[in-house]
Image (cartoon, coloured by chain):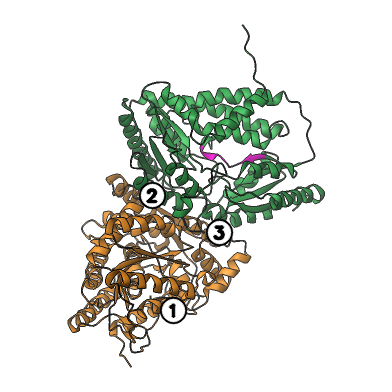
Amino acid sequence: MTTTQPTIEALVADLEARFDDVDLGHVRAWKDGARHRLAVGCLPVFAPREVIWAAGALPVFVRGAGDRIETIRGDAYYQSYICHLPRSTLELGLLGHLDVLDGMVFPNTCDVIRNLSGMWQTSFPQHIVRFLDPPQTAEPASAAAYLHHELTTLFRDLCAHNGVEPVPARLHLAIADYAAANVVMRELAAARQREPWNLPVDEVYLLKRAADSMPPRDWADLARRYLAAAAARGRKPEDRIRVCLVGSFCEQPPRALLRAAEKAGCYIIDDDLTLGVEPNGPDPLLGDDGDPMAAIVAAWLRTTRPSAVRYDEHGTAGRILAERVAAVGADGVVFAAPSFCDPALLDQPRLTRVLDQRNIPYTSFKYAENTGQFQAIREQAGTFADSVKLWGTA
Amino acid sequence: MIKKEPSMDAQKDLLAGYFARLGRAKDEGRPVVYTFVPGNLVELMAAFDVAPVYPEVNALQSAMRQRSSGFIREAERGGHSEDVCSYVKCDLGMLAKGNVGPTGDTIPPPDLLLLSFTGCFTFMKWFELLREQYDCEVAMLHVPYVGDGVVTAAMRAYVVEQLQREVIPKLEKVTGKRLDLDKLRAQLARSRQAEEDLAWVFKSARHRPSPIDAYFGGVYYIGPIFTSFRGSEDACRYYAMLRGEVEERLAAGLGPITPEGSLGDEKFRLVVEGPPNWTSFRDFWKIFYDEGAVCVASTYTQVGGTYERGFRHDPANPLESLADYCLSCYTNLPLPQRSRILADMVKEYEADGFVIHSVKSCNSFSAGQLHMLREVERLTGVPGGFIESDLVDARYYGQANIKNRIESYLQMLHARRTGGSVPPPPRPERVHLEVVP
C-alpha cells in the first residue's frame, strides 16, 4: 500500500479552510476526540504554550478576526484611536465564534490587551481568564522565581479544571512536543530564506497561522508535507528584492496586503507576524534540578529575539535587527505596523536610526487588520523595491 | 476680588522651589534620577538625597504653558508617529530642543533612569527611547499588573526582591551612599501623615455642598504628594494647611474654589474618570463650573496612590509598603475593579452622574472605558457621559464639542431629576488661580 503525497494545492486549500474557519471547527474536533481536553485562547504576543499543552489544553492564538468578519459590536466598545484587534476579538467572542474555548490567557503585550483582559472577565464569565505579566526586569533571580510561580499556578489551575494531575511528566512531554514543532519551524524559516519563490509569503503565513491552533506534532507533520511539496515546485526566482517585515507581531495585516507587497517586488523572507508560535531562542533544556517548569522559565528569560513587547535591556534591538537582516540575506526592511500600536510605532525611530547608520534601506506604512485598499501600499512597496534594485537604497 | 487661600501660594512655592533645586542639583552634587509618577519611589529616592525628575509632569506643565504643541511637532519631525502617546512626544521634543523645562530652567541630565513600570506599558517604551539619549545607569522595576484584582504574596515578593537587588544597589552606586533604613522609615511616616490629610480632604466632598472640586481642584491637591514631596516636612505642612482651609470652607458651607471664585450653587455632583486635558485646562474646567457642576470624586487623583480608598505607606515594613503602593495604583488595577471603584464613588459621594474623559494618548486609561461606562451604569443605575480629547496635544481638544456634550449631558441629568428645564448657571466672583498642579 502506498500513501499519496498531497498536492500543494490541496495543502494550501486545507490551510485556507482552517484560516477562514472563525468558529475553530478543527479545535472543536480535536476536543471531541478524547476526554480531558480543553482549548485555551491566547492573545498575542507570547503565551506559555508548553504549560497550557501540558495541562491537556490546546493553546489557540487569537489574533483578531482580520477581514474575515465584519466588526460591528466590537466597534461600540472602542474609541477611534484604539487599534482594531480588540474590537474584532470582542466581536468574535460576542458572536459565539470562540465558544469552543474554555479560557483565555492575556499576556502583557500592551495596555489595550491588558485592559481587554478585564473586559473579558466581565463579558465572558464562563471562561477561565488569566492575565500573564512575564517579567520585564533585568534582575534574573527575581524574574525566574516570579515567572515560575505564575506559570505553576496557571498549570495547576488548568489541570484542576481539566481533571488531570499536574505532574512534571506532563510538562516533559509538552516540552518535547513543542521542540519537535520548533525543528520544523526552523526548517520552514530556512527554506523561505533559501527559495522564497517556492514559498510565497501568503502560503508561509497560512502555515504559521495553522500552528496557532494545532497540536504541535500534528502541525509539524503538516508543515513537513508542505515543505516537501513546495520544494518540488521548481519555480524560477524573479527579480525581486528580499525584505524583512517588522512590526506586525500583534494585529495582523490582511493576507491581501502581504500578497500585494510581494507581488510589488518584495520577497518577504522573514517576519514577526507570529512570534508566539516560533522559536525565539533556545528550546527549554532540562537543568540539573530536573524541574521542567524551571526549564520553560529559563528558555523564556533567554529569549534572544527582541520584540517591541519585551524590555530591551541592553538597547540592542536595532543592532540585532540589522544583524538579522544580514543573516537572512535581506536587502531591506519593511516596517508594517498597525495604526495606533504604541509598542511597534514607538520602536520604529529607535530601529530606523540603526538601519540608517548601517545604510540598510527601509520603508514603512501602517494598516488595520480590515484594511481593504492596497493600491497605495502596492505602489510604495514597488517603489521601494525599484529603488533598492536600482540604487541599493530607498 | 477673592483672596487666594494660603495653600495655593504654598503649593506654588513648593513647585517653584522644586524646579529651582533641580536646576542646582548638579552644582550641589545631588545625582538626578528620572522616573515616573505612578508607582514612584520618592521616599527611597529622598533617603538617598537624589533629585527626582518626572517627565510626564514636565509634559503637562509644558502643555499648561502652551509649549507642548511645538515639542510634539519636533518629535514627529524626528520620526514619531502621530498615533502614539503625546506625553512621550512632548518629552522627547523638549529634549531635542535643549531640555528646557516648563519654568525656563534647563532640566539636568539624569545620573540614573529609574523605570518604575507601573500601570502603563508605554512607560517602558518611553524609557527605552530616553536611554538612547543618555549615557547613565538604568534601573528597571517591573511592577506586575494586578490582573485579577488581588495583590498576591508572589507579586509583593517579586517587587521587593527587585528593590533589593536592582533598584537600591543602583541608587547606592550613583550616590556612593548606603541605604539608611531609618531615614526611609521616617520618610514613610511623613508620607502616611500627609496621606491621612489628603484622604480627609477628598472625603470632604461627601458633604453638600462639596467644599472642593475633587477633579479640577484635585489635580492641584495631588501635585506635591504624587511627585517630589511625599515624605517631606513640606508635604506634611502643605496638607495640614490644605485640610485646615477645607475644614473652614466646610464649616462655612462654602463650595469649591474655581478660577472665577467660589462656586455658590452646587447644581450637579459628578464623578470623573480619566486624566484632564492640560492644553486647555481652564477652559475645560469652565465648562463644568459654568453649569454649576462639581466633581466630587475622580479616579485620576488615584493614579499616584489610592489614599482615598485607604492605602497608607507603612514605615514598619518599608520595602513591602513601597511594593504595595506600586501595585495598588489605580491604573495598575483591572477594569472590573476600576468599574467598581467608580460605581462605589458614585454611591458614596451621592453623585448625580459620572463623566468619562477619554484621552487619545493614554491607552492605559482609555482602552475599555466604553465598557466601563456600561458597567458603571449597570452597577449604579446612573447614566454616564463620555467626552474625548488628549493630554497635551492641543490638536485633539475641541472646546465647542466638549462643551456641547457636557451641557447636553447635564441637561439630561437635570431632566431626569426634575422633569423641568435646566436652571441658569451660577456667576462666581472672579479670582486668579495659579497653575500649580
Q: Which amino acid is tagged 2?
A: Met
Amino acid carrying mark 1 in the image: Asp
Residue drawn at (28%, 46%) of the image:
B152
Q: Residues within 10 Å of mark 2 (few under 14, many from 20)?
A: many
Q: What distance separates the C-alpha of mark 1 from that of mark 2?
A: 33 Å
* Magenta residues (range): A269-276
Q: Which chain has been coloured green in this picture?
A: A
Report the disc number at residue B283.
1
Q: Which residue is mark 3?
A: B132
Q: Is residue B247 left or right of residue B220?
A: left
In the image, is A127 to the left or to the right of A265? left
Q: Chain B's shade in the image? A: orange
Query: Count the marks: how many?
Result: 3
Residue at left offset 42%, top offset 79%: B282
Q: Which residue is mark 2?
A: A119
Q: CA distance from mark 2 to mark 3?
A: 36 Å
Kind of residue sitting beneath label 3: Glu
The percent coordinates of residue A200 (x first, y second) are 69, 35
Q: Hey, which residue is sitting farthest top in the picture?
A: A1
Residue situated furthest bottom in the rendering: B1
Residue A352: which quarter of the image?
A: bottom right
Q: Nearer the viewer, residue B253 or A100?
A: A100
